[in-house]
């Protein structure tokens, strides 16, 4: 394995460049995952995600290629009153061959209800809770997770909070071509990801492309299937969903995003369908931040911002959540490079625990739109209380204790007067060819 890793690093050094424009502090050790035997047909790396209205996608992996893509489920432990058959896939990556990857959609399901389920007719029973159909709803938010001691601390803190769904704005496993790390990441997050839906979008560490040999995002797309088809998207790299009065846009920083791209056209169509009476809150997630006063990754989101910020502004998006920069930052409501009461609040939360460490060098003086910034590992919690008010808090991982370090009440744009003022601009943009 060591010689293989050296060879891969030598090959990919030609294609991957490292930034050295900021100093990272010491990090915690990457978690060690010794090989352990398991039933070849037993499920592992189980995680769940929304799959349209009142449906959930159960994803898992088995080593046995003959294991069925079957999920049995019910509201009483050990009593399965319903079942669904799904689909499966697998992939090869150089010398690595994945197990059988299962994706099975179950439902319709009741809201705010605990279900017990079993994958492939055997193995352990899992327990999940469906999200509510109306406010309040709480999202846990953490990006750039990786697999370090800090990651484990972040996940433990998230497990302690009462949340309904995890939002992850890119950079999951930090496998970086070593496919076994996708497997260990699946094992690491299974306790949380099998019990609450994890809604993710891609980051740069998911790309794993090899010129002339491998297209990008093959491993990510095979393992983490999101509801792109259910939302009318042609790519797993961008999609949307509704939950409890919130419309969530999961955009792709690494999919084409100019005005002639499929993603841009899809976003225009998706925003045209949003009914703010039914979903008074609109959130957007993607990996590369547009508003960033850290010296790391400066300007990397400029092209996406140039094409898509007018769309999000015209549609009255309330909050934008991003990762990529390994630190935390919260902006004022902002648009076109300056504070704007009708723009979204931008929050960078790429501090989940990755092995690369923190980005702790900031631009001074601080931009007028930057409200709070700090280079520490942690996670965020967004509780949307009702159609007009939400409470955001960021919890620093301080000496293994979750410390609430930033908090703010956010008022939705629906009652601000901004939405009515923007209706003309939105119609103008949406009608443009």
Image: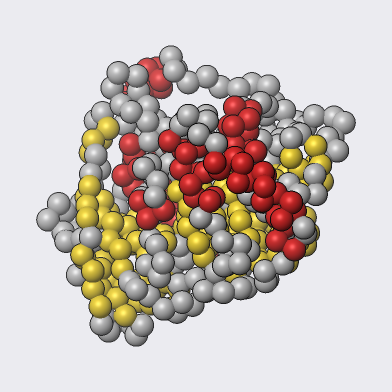
Give the mark count. 0
> Looking at this view, is 180 or 135 the one in front?
135
* Residue plotted at (26% across, 51% down): 101
* Residue plotted at (56% across, 22% down): 18
Horizontal relation, residue 273 to residue 33: left or right: right
The image quadrant of residue 182 is top left
Horizontal relation, residue 387 to residue 331: left or right: left
Residue 392 placed where, x, y %?
Answer: 71, 60
> Looking at this view, is 279 or 362 the one in front?
279
**Considering only vertical position in the picture, is 235 above or below 280?**
above
* Residue plotted at (62% across, 73% down): 136
Q: Is residue 212 visible?
A: yes
**Considering only vertical position in the picture, is 197 above or below 110?**
above
Horizontal relation, residue 242 to residue 50: left or right: right
**Considering only vertical position in the picture, is 303 above or below 105?**
above
Residue 170 placed where, x, y %?
Answer: 51, 43
Residue 180 placed where, x, y %?
Answer: 34, 40
Q: Quadrant of the N terminus?
A: top left
The image quadrant of residue 279 is bottom right
* Residue plotted at (33% across, 71% down): 107
Horizontal relation, residue 264 to residue 106: left or right: right
> Looking at this view, is 364 or 360 the one in front?
364
């Amino acid at each position: 394995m060591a010689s293989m890793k050296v060879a891969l690093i030598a090959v990919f050094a030609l294609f991957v460049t490292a930034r050295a424009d900021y100093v990272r502090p010491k990090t915690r050790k990457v978690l060690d995952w010794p090989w352990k035997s398991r039933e070849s047909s037993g499920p592992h790396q189980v995680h769940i995600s929304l799959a349209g209205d009142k449906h959930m996608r159960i994803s898992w992996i088995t080593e046995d290629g003959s294991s069925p893509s079957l999920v049995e489920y019910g509201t009483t432990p050990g009593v399965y009153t319903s079942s669904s058959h799904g689909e499966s896939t697998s992939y090869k990556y150089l010398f690595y061959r994945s197990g059988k990857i299962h994706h099975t959609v179950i439902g319709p399901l009741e809201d705010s209800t605990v279900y017990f389920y079993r994958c492939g007719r055997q193995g352990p029973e899992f327990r999940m809770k469906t999200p509510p159909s109306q406010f309040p709803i709480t999202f846990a938010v953490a990006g750039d997770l990786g697999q370090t001691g800090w990651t484990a601390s972040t996940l433990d803190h998230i497990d302690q909070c009462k949340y309904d769904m995890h939002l992850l704005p890119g950079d999951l496993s930090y496998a970086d071509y070593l496919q076994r790390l996708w497997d260990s990441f699946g094992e690491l997050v299974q306790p949380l990801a099998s019990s609450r839906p994890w809604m993710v979008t891609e980051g740069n560490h998911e790309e794993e492309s090899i010129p002339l040999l491998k297209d990008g995002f093959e491993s990510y797309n095979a393992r983490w299937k999101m509801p792109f088809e259910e939302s009318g998207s042609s790519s797993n790299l961008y999609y949307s969903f509704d939950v409890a009065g919130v419309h969530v846009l999961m955009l792709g920083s690494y999919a084409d995003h100019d005005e002639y791209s499929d993603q841009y056209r899809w976003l225009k169509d998706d925003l045209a369908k949003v009914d703010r009476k039914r979903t008074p809150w609109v959130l957007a997630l993607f990996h590369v931040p547009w508003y960033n006063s850290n010296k790391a990754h400066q300007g990397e989101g400029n092209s996406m911002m140039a094409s898509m910020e007018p769309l999000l502004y015209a549609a009255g998006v309330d909050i934008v959540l991003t990762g990529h920069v390994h630190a935390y930052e919260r902006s004022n409501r902002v648009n076109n490079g300056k504070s704007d009461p009708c723009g979204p609040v931008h929050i960078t939360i790429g501090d989940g625990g990755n092995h690369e460490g923190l980005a702790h060098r900031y631009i001074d003086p601080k931009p007028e739109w930057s409200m709070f910034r700090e280079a520490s590992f942690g996670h965020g919690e967004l509780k949307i209380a009702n159609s007009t008010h939400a409470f955001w808090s960021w919890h620093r991982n301080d000496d293994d204790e979750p410390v609430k370090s930033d908090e703010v009440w956010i008022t939705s744009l629906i009652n601000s007067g901004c939405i009515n003022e923007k209706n003309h601009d939105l119609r103008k943009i949406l009608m443009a060819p």
